[in-house]
Image: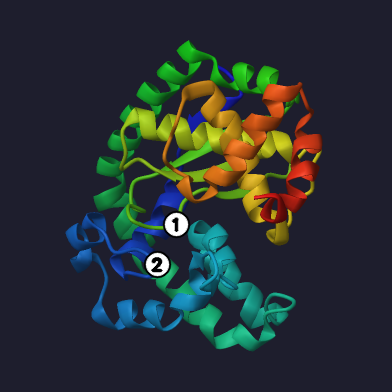
Amino acid sequence: MGKIQCVYDKDNNYFFHLMSVAKVGYDNAYGEKHKDSMSEEDVATLRKYEKELTMKGGEYNGKLFWTGMYVGNAKDAIHKIQSEGGFPGFEAYHDALLEIFGIFVKYYDDYCKRIWPEEEKLLDQTAREWQRRFDEEGLDEKAERLVGIRSETIFFASLISSIGHGVEAIIYETEDGNTVDLFSIDRDYNSARALFLHEYIITLLGKRIPFSLEAYDRYEGLAEYYTEELIGKTYNFTDMDRYIEFYRRKMSEKAYAPEELFEMAAGLEIEI
């Protein structure tokens, strides 16, 4: 097994189950299928905090998105609020957190018993198939050779069955330095392959190039340039074609390091 590993876990899937059923950032067939698994009152509560619970570039900043880390031990989070004063920096959300964590607790057992077994089978089947094909292609090693940056950590592609038509590629680091990135299984292998590879290259670039929102297009465009060099046009980031073509033109002149390409593209708007 290579450095790109397909995994899944119950708690992540439970969080997005709730979000999809409540249509908080997601409106999909999964949420419709399980719409009777949550009361209308609790749906309304989660929707009340939609902007805080949703990560959606440029629109919602997800100030409470982190609550998803507590779906499996929400009782402890409630105790922390009630006995210890809550989470530092989020005192203004005292009541909101109690409501949200209360919903996490309320439906957890039902999800584990009635819904998770079916979802786990689907996730396991998908993870096994995608992992087999990733390993056969050795895309992680190919990406490292092309970019010229090696990784000593694991990129966990964490699969979710309930985030169709929603925000994906939500990336974070674990305490041991590995990376977790969230992806929907509502796609075919070729689509997964393109998106996973792009995100893996993002982690490679991050070892040399600090990420900033101001340089978002340059950064994502560079990752997509390398992705397309490996597997061809993906059509995932067509709004960054000018960056991709710029990087390709520069690399036809001579072999540049990724950080050199990134810096040269700083004045791209003027050049084009």
Q: Marks 1 and 2: CB-CB under 8 Å?
A: yes
Q: Who comes first in sequence, dot 1 or dot 2? A: 2
Callout 1 secondary element = loop
| Disc 1 target residue | 167
Question: In the rendered view, would you say 72 is above or below 23?
Answer: above
Position of residue 233 in the picture relative to residue 151 (left or right): left
- Give the residue drawn at x 48%, y 68%: 54
- Quadrant of the snapshot with the N terminus: top right
| Residue 92 % position (x, y) | 65, 88
- Give the residue drawn at x 46%, y 32%: 194
Foreground residue among 60 and 89? 60
Question: In the rendered view, would you say 167 is above or below 177?
Answer: below
The local crowd at label 1, few if under 14, some if 14 to 19, many if 20 or more residues have their Cα within 10 Å, is some
| Residue 18 % position (x, y) | 36, 64
Question: In the rendered view, would you say 39 is above or below 249?
Answer: below
- Tell me the amino acid under the disc marked 1: Val
- Give the residue drawn at x 54%, y 15%: 138
Position of residue 245 in the picture relative to residue 110 (left or right): right
Callout 2 secondary element = loop
> Where, by quadrant of the figure, is residue 46 drawn?
bottom left
Give the farthest residue toward the front: 271
Q: CA distance from mark 1 to mark 2?
A: 8 Å
Give the farthest residue toward the top: 136
Q: Which mark is residue 25?
A: 2
The local crowd at label 2, few if under 14, some if 14 to 19, many if 20 or more residues have their Cα within 10 Å, is many
